Image: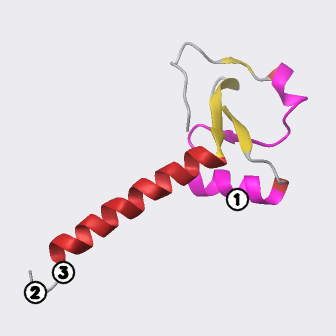
Amino acid sequence: MAELGPHDCTDAAPAAGLAEVFAYSDETSRSAVEKMATSGLTTLLVVDRATQGVCGTVSLKDLLLGRRRRMKREQQRARVFSPGR
């Protein structure tokens, strides 16, 4: 999730009218993707649960980049542990 510094959060109240669907900063990526899928949105605001301030955004592109990195790590791990080497 794209994040700003802890002191960069802004009040979510003005943004709440624009975005009824958002992700909390302590939620999983899976939860954010599910919200995107059900709402049809590809970008969500990230809100701090304690302060209700907007801390950043997360996009489908961000989430896919994370998945791509994980796949590459798994492929490298499979090469290291593959039989016959």
Residue 44 is situated, as x and y percent measured from the top left of the image, at 72, 40
Q: Residue at x 84, y 35 (%)?
A: 19
Few, some or many residues within 10 Å of mark 3 (<14, 14–19, 20+): few
Q: Are marks 2 and 3 in contact (CB under 8 Å)?
A: yes
Q: Secondary structure at mark 2?
A: loop
What residue range appears in magenta? 14-38
Q: Looking at this rendering, what residue extends furthest in the top direction? A: 7
Please give the residue where the numbered disc 1 appears in the rendered image.
34
Whole-number angstrom distance, CA of label 2 to CA of label 3: 7 Å
Q: Earlier in the sequence, mark 1 or mark 2?
A: 1
- Image coordinates of residue 58 in percent, x first then y, are 63, 39
In this orientation, does residue 36 appear?
yes
Q: Residues within 10 Å of mark 2 (few under 14, many from 20)?
A: few
Question: Which residue corresponds to mark 2?
Answer: 84
Q: Residue 9 vs residue 74: left or right?
A: right
Q: Nearer the viewer, residue 63 or 15?
A: 63
Query: Left or right: where does residue 30 sit relative to residue 15?
Result: left
Q: Amino acid at mark 1?
A: Glu
Q: Is residue 58 left or right of residue 85?
A: right
The Cα–Cα distance between marks 1 and 2, rounded to whole angstroms, is 40 Å
> In the image, what residue type sits under mark 3?
Ser
Q: Secondary structure at mark 3?
A: loop
Is residue 57 located in the magenta-colored stretch of the structure?
no
Residue pictured at 88% horizontal, 30% vertical: 18
Determine whether 80 is above or below 24 in the image. below
* Residue that label 3 marks: 82
Badge 1: few (under 14), some or many (20 or more) residues near its Cα, within 10 Å?
Answer: few
Indicate the quadrant containing the C terminus: top left, top right, bottom left or bottom right: bottom left
